[in-house]
Image (spheres, rainbow, N blue to C red):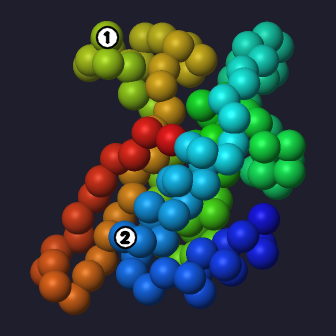
Amino acid sequence: MLARIKAIETGYSTQGEKIAAVLNFVQEEVRYLGFESGLGSYKPFAPNQVFEQRYGDCKDKSLLMVTMLRKMGIEAYPVLVNTALKHNINAVLPHQQQPLITVSLRSSTVPETTCGTILP
């Protein structure tokens, strides 16, 4: 995983390009496969394991992306969202919600922090 992170860091110059490269990697090279029973319904697998096996569910892919971005010094956080229940997110179990990624971008051309949300 560290070699891929280094390749992205050296291959792209802006934060936006690096974020897009990590997103593309997670979307295109890590297959979605969910084992929704037992602990795997709630707890993501380790990012190194997901990277090596090249598959994981939403939680796994989100955590992998956040981990890769953070290792590049890009502020990123996993976020749970349930589009059907809107403001009642606390009333349901985590496995019923969709994990997203929130990334904080800082740029000399943008005076304030811009946040974007990404679905891996």
Label 1 residue SS: loop
Which residue is located at x 77 percent, y 72 percent? 2
Image quadrant containing the N terminus: bottom right
Q: Position of residue 74 (x, y in %)?
A: 48, 72
Indicate which disc, 1 or 2, sits on the residue closer to the N terminus.
2
- Residue 99, relative to residue 63: is it above or below? above
Q: Give the number of the disc on residue 16.
A: 2
Which residue is located at x 48 percent, y 71 percent? 18
Which residue is located at x 16 percent, y 78 percent? 110
Label 2 residue SS: helix
Relative side of 33 to 10, left or right: right
Residue type (three-letter) at the residue carrying disc 1:
Ala
Q: Nearer the viewer, mark 1 or mark 2?
A: 2
Residue type (three-letter) at the residue carrying disc 2:
Gly
- Residue 76, relative to residue 11: is it above or below? above
Q: Position of residue 15 (x, y in %)?
A: 40, 76
Q: Residues within 10 Å of mark 2 (few under 14, many from 20)?
A: some
Identify the image quadrant of residue 28.
top right
Q: Give the number of the disc on residue 84.
A: 1
Relative side of 16 to 30, left or right: left
Identify the image quadrant of residue 13.
bottom left
Q: Give the number of the disc on residue 111.
A: none
Relative side of 83 to 68, left or right: left
Q: Position of residue 59 (x, y in %)?
A: 63, 34
Question: Spatial distance from mark 1 to mark 2, Cα to Cα?
Answer: 30 Å
Q: Residues within 10 Å of mark 1 (few under 14, many from 20)?
A: few
Quick check: can you spot residue 63? no
